[in-house]
Image (spheres, grey):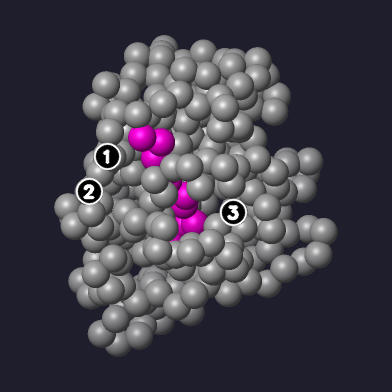
């Protein structure tokens, strides 16, 4: 067995953002049409430390993909990433493993790309102010991806530590750091929640009419997204499995009627209507579907073969 090994740096150089957005658009449509095989993800938890998730997926025309991703919040105190991941690609014709690659960068970018696709569908055409809550890995990825779908004039960044907000804001001339979450959210057209908080980080009273809110945090049994925002907004999800209890679904939606959610793929295909008015509150709650990892890893793998990047290892 010979595997292609790809490091984090190589994955970063091979994952083209334009290809990712295009590939995910097709992937979400296929997911809503029932063409993607992706069993509910399974979880192993270490009490008081973190968890490890197993996420397999396959869609005809792509390799079979399995991602192992861990979330250990205490890692920040150890100088380690909170989220770490590995992705394995398997030949669907023979079952032979083809590649192993770092999955941390893919996890960040495909998550932000799904939020960006939701904003492309649901944010008002005149949206000009973006607020990013959280200046960590996801905040960084959102700063790269969201401006791809709207021409923002102002980007506000708020985090637990103001210095982190300042550091991230320095990466974009349109961005500036805010002292509080409320300051960042007030008057924003698009609000992206990118935290690991177990409790809501915004209030519905802060949101402007017609705002689009995205949330990618996963911190069961709670989470960063207030239930009032979910209930009063037009809710969009990657898959209605998001309404299942964790680890399959997310804490903020557990127990709610899945019929209240529209799948992103249905919006992208035109089978579901976008926002009803310029004053409608729209909400995208992401769980991070295995299809997204499959699409992103396939792009990296194909580009690696084309460019001759990576190392071969025999097992």
Q: Quadrant of the N terminus?
A: bottom left
Closest to the observer, 53 or 155: 155
Q: Where's residue 283, x and y in %? A: 43, 43
Q: Please tell me whether residue 260 is drawn above or below residue 137 in the rendered image.
A: below
Residue at (32%, 23%) from the top-left corner? Answer: 127
Please check the rendered image and state whether residue 283 is part of the magenta-colored stretch, yes or no.
Answer: yes
Kind of element beneath mark 1: loop
**Pointers 2 and 1 in contact (C-beta within 8 Å):** yes
Residue furthest bottom in the image: 94
Q: Where's residue 227, x and y in %? A: 59, 47
Q: Which mark is residue 252?
A: 3
Q: Which residue is mark 2?
A: 273
The magenta stretch spans which residues? 280-290
Q: Which residue is mark 1?
A: 276
* Spatial separation of the CA atoms under disc 3 and disc 1: 24 Å
Kind of element beneath mark 2: loop
* Spatial separation of the CA atoms under disc 2 and disc 1: 8 Å
Residue at (52%, 41%) from the top-left corner? Answer: 229
Q: Where's residue 201, x and y in %? A: 64, 35
Could you tell which of marks 2 and 3 lies nearer the N-terminus?
A: 3
Q: Where's residue 245, x and y in %? A: 59, 68
């Amino acid at each position: 067995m010979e595997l292609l090994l790809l490091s984090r740096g190589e994955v970063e150089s091979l994952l083209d953002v334009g290809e990712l957005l295009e590939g995910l658009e097709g992937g979400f449509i296929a997911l809503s049409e029932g063409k993607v095989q992706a069993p509910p993800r399974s979880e192993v938890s270490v009490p008081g430390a973190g968890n490890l998730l197993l996420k397999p997926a396959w869609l005809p025309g792509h390799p079979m993909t399995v991602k192992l991703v861990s979330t250990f919040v205490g890692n920040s105190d150890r100088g380690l990433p909170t989220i770490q991941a590995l992705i394995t690609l398997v030949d669907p014709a023979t079952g032979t493993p083809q590649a192993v690659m770092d999955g941390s960068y893919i996890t960040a970018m495909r998550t932000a790309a799904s939020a960006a696709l939701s904003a492309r569908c649901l944010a008002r055409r005149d949206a000009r102010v973006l607020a990013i809550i959280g200046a960590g890995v996801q905040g960084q990825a959102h700063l790269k991806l969201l401006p791809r779908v709207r021409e923002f004039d102002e980007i506000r960044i708020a985090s637990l530590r103001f210095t982190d907000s300042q550091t991230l804001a320095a990466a974009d001339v349109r961005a500036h750091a805010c002292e509080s979450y409320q300051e960042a959210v007030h008057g924003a057209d698009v609000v992206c929640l990118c935290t690991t908080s177990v409790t809501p980080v915004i209030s519905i009273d802060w949101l402007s009419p017609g705002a689009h809110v995205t949330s990618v945090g996963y911190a069961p049994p709670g989470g960063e997204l207030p239930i009032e925002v979910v209930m009063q907004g037009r809710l969009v999800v990657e898959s209605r499995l998001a309404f299942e209890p964790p680890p399959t679904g997310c804490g903020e939606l557990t127990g709610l009627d899945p019929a209240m959610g529209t799948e992103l793929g249905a919006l992208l295909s035109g089978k579901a209507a976008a926002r009803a008015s310029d004053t409608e509150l729209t909400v995208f709650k992401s769980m991070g579907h295995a299809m997204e990892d499959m699409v992103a890893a396939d792009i990296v793998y194909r580009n690696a073969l084309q460019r001759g990047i990576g190392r071969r290892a025999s097992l």
